[in-house]
Amino acid sequence: MLLLAGAVAVLHAAVVLFLLTGSLIALHRPRILWLHAPLALVILALYVTGSDCPLTTLELALRERAGLPAYRGGFIGHYITEPLGFPIHATATQVGVVLLAVVPNAIGYGLLVTRYVRDRRAGRRTPV
């Protein structure tokens, strides 16, 4: 179970990294938007509603079955912000987390929309 819990944590880290970089990756691989956009919307919905992430829930269940203690503060708090000394529930940390998620995606999607509009005006088809 411990190995499975670790695998879920690694998958979770990959999902977080993809959330942060997916729109920028799409600048070179536009078809990735079919995966990134729905994933980003689901993560946004979980965050806005205060719901637990299913990957965190699965990891914690596997940790418990392996005899390890559960952690509080969610995946990002446990593995990223708390070890760096930033309590996950602090307002500044929450603002930082949101900015780290929103800024690269705003840039990526803004560039993609700009490219799409420019290509449409030039009569070219943009693959998506």
Image (tube, helix red, strand yellow):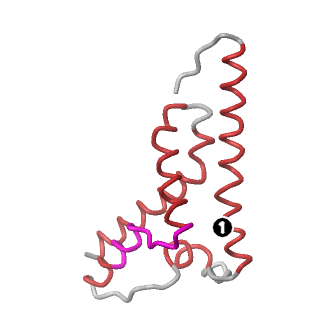
Task: Give the residue pinned by disc 1.
Answer: 97
Q: Quadrant of residue 2?
A: bottom left
Q: Main secondary structure of the magenta part?
A: helix
Residue 84 appears in which quarter of the rendering?
bottom right
Residue 106 in the image: x percent, y percent?
69, 47
- Horizontal arrangement in the rendering, residue 111 relative to residue 21 (left or right): right
Residue in view at x 52 percent, y 38 percent: 33
Q: Quick one: quadrant of the N terminus?
A: bottom left
Q: Is residue 55 magenta?
A: yes
Give, as a single range, the part of the protein colored magenta.
48-60
Q: Position of residue 26 (x, y in %)?
A: 57, 36
Q: Residue at x 38, y 89 (%)?
A: 69
The residue under label 1 is which amino acid type? Answer: Val
Local crowd size for mark 1, using a 10 Å CA cut-off: few (<14), some (14–19), many (≥20): some
Compared with 113, 84 (above or below) is below
Give left or right: position of 25 versus 61: right
- Residue at (68% x, 80% y) in the render: 86
- Nearer to us in this view, 99 or 29: 99
In the rendered image of this protein, does residue 123 appear above or below residue 8? above
Position of residue 48 relative to residue 84, above or below, is: above
- Estimate the x, y position of residue 108 in percent, counting from the top left: 67, 41
Q: Is residue 53 left or right of residue 1?
A: right
